[in-house]
Image (cartoon, grey):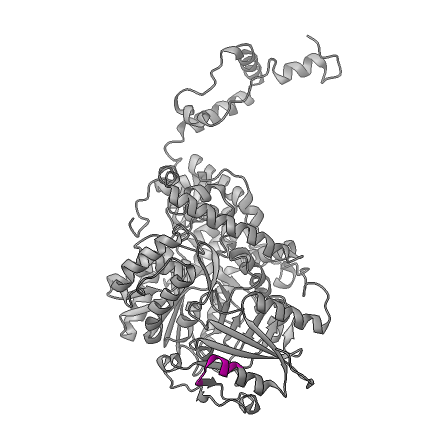
Amino acid sequence: MSGTFVGMPAFPEAAHEAVHNATLRGNLRHATHTIRAKRAKAVAEVSDWAALREAGKQIKDHTLRHLDRYLVQLEESVTTAGGTVHWAADADEANRIVADLVKATGETEVVKVKSMATQEIGLNEALLEEGIHAYETDLAELIVQLGKDRPSHILVPAIHRNRGEIRDIFAREMSEWGRPAPEGLTDTPAELAEAARLHLREKFLRAKVGISGANFMVAETGTLVVVESEGNGRMCLTLPETLISVVGIEKIVPTWQDLEVFLQTLPRSSTAERMNPYTSTWTGTTDEDGPQTFHLVLLDNGRTDTLADEVGRQALRCIRCSACLNVCPVYERAGGHAYGSVYPGPIGAILSPQLRGTQSEIDASLPYASSLCGACYEVCPVAIDIPEVLVHLRERVAEGGLTTRDGNKVVLKPAKGHAAERAAMRAARWAFSHPGALRTGQRLASRTRRFHPRTLPGPGRAWSASRDLPAMPAEPFRDWWQRTQGGRKADSK
Amino acid sequence: MSSRGVILGRVRRAIADVRQDDTPYGQAIDRSYLREHGARSVAETVDLLAENLADYRAVVHRTTDDELSELLMRLLAERGTRTVLVPPELPSHWLKAVDATRVHDRAQSTPAELDRVDSVVTACAVAIAETGTIVLDGGPDQGRRRVTLVPDHHICVVHVPDQVVSSVPQALERLDPTRPLTWISGPSATSDIELDRVEGVHGPRTLEVVLVSGQPRAEATS
């Protein structure tokens, strides 16, 4: 397993491999079913869930509609509070800014809080090229980093690993990175957590630079919020002298009051808790408490392109809770790696092709990595209509058309491999606009129905291998309607 | 052009289609969700706090202001605490019965020094009943953020009912966003192994919360 997503095969191939891995399927099934039931219970405790969900959606939509104004306001308030704001148009620029900031401190190692944004831009790899070692401190990220693995879940990147595999990784790899795993380490979760505590302790205590993301940024006050469980976030946010936070521009909320919605919906949606163990908020720097230097790197990296799409922009409401992954029947079977992105599951299937564009094989296949069952939309705490965006992106892949890349309008060509689909749609369009031809065709189909094959020939074979073809009626509907005057006359031939 | 200009320009072009929408912030969001869930008496709210704290494995004690010092002494002694971290303005009578060595919260202490301290005792800014959360705001009776993080044992004293609110919205109203805040709901935990909650990772593995009622009572219960 390599640690990068570059050159990933299309979803069907990657998923095909994954569904034959019995351990992976067992691990995923166990974990997602555990959390599903718990989430439903945590949500049921809150009688106004629907109103909170709607308010969360409205706050995010309002912010996105005025994002330029709120970005400028945030910059002002963070600066006033003692922070420095940087702007990064893409991953390379963000990585360069962070590497330069770390180098300016003279340090060669940093501790990191789990952050989707820094995963997305490949910050650890970029820092390593500059001779800077980044240590992941979230337990699941540590498992992934030590196992030279890739994340497969937004909240629990090592969800594909069971306790036995985690034990083996710790016993084998910890000594390479620092304090070795305790002798005779067993696979009980409490012991594994203890091993991580001991291993990371020395790194926290000597760290001079911390790197984080943020769950929310409050424009009005300049406050950043990190929601976490283990305390590794608090370690990285308070012990180092310098803190660098890399945050997507869509993470803004206008006011302090807005947090009252998300601090209720996020924990219940993600870990199914009334409240997560630790939430840290900080506004710039505080004299003699925590880092005395604070840098905020605002990241675009495809977000403004996503914002330009009238249907697809709702994906930017996402608060990264991962509830949609946990209920998804496709994710449960294919696993996170098949999505070829740090954002797997239903949200990944609409976010990755928008952030990265639909040109690559994997990104063009992601909108199809769904049965459109809609469970993801049901559980989404900010009401992202994921099926709607999936269908919209399928249209973009199959038909091409106008889209935005790096801030420029471009016209995409229809993707290869959808020629049969397009031909079928063209034929349908022609038939429906020629009633005479349609009638002849329908009659012909009805009369020859005894000779129809059970499965489609040629390229349609794969489709009909697991589906029944619709049964052809003995008489076309329109003929029946005319003959019986819409059912008023006795239905006898 | 600077990246700032590039990004702001891209944002403005991206939302050009909704520029006409100038619904002000105050009208754009329907705030008909609840300010608190359910109707409770003050005493019931405090009970709910205790229940939810305990549900996430915090150890909850109840006492009166008069008996607080005795209780703290007992809790620290039971754990065998020899050194206890003390925020600058912790009320002095809280620890008057405690004989563990006081370690003061100072800017120049190193994290490694804090790591050798057994316990920390603090007050809090507010406690949230519905979620079982205590919030620290770095006030002088709570100290710097790191003092409640590095030691393995944290005792937090909550004045009830004054410091208790029902809900998250009520807590945010009371808090000052310009202060560095730490919201704590139970001891440090993780769900990273098979999505099942395990207590005890990097933060204090033992969290004890002492609910102190204002009126002295004849007998403290714990």
Q: What is the quadrant of the N terminus of chain B in the image?
A: bottom left
Q: Is residue B30 left or right of residue A416?
A: right
Image point 66% across, 57% down: which residue? Answer: A48
| Residue drawn at (71%, 73%) of the image | B42
In this rendering, position of residue A208 left or right of residue B186 = left
Q: Quadrant of residue A269?
A: bottom right
User: Left of B130 or right of it: where is A235?
Assistant: left
Number of residue marks: 0
Identify whether A463 is placed above or below A402: above
Residue B80 is inside the magenta segment: yes
Q: Quadrant of residue A94?
A: bottom left
Range of residues picked out in magenta: B75-83
Pinpoint residue B119: horizontal percent, then vertical percent: 46, 80
Is residue A277 positioned above or below A451 on the image?
below
Query: Residue at coordinates 51% horizontally, 24% vertically from top-left?
Result: A468
| Furthest residue in direction top, as rendered | A493
* Residue A140 left/right relative to A425: left
Q: How far from the left and from the top, in percent, is residue A330?
A: 46, 41
Q: Is residue A370 visible?
A: yes
Q: Could you say which is closer to the camera, residue A418 or residue B34?
A: B34
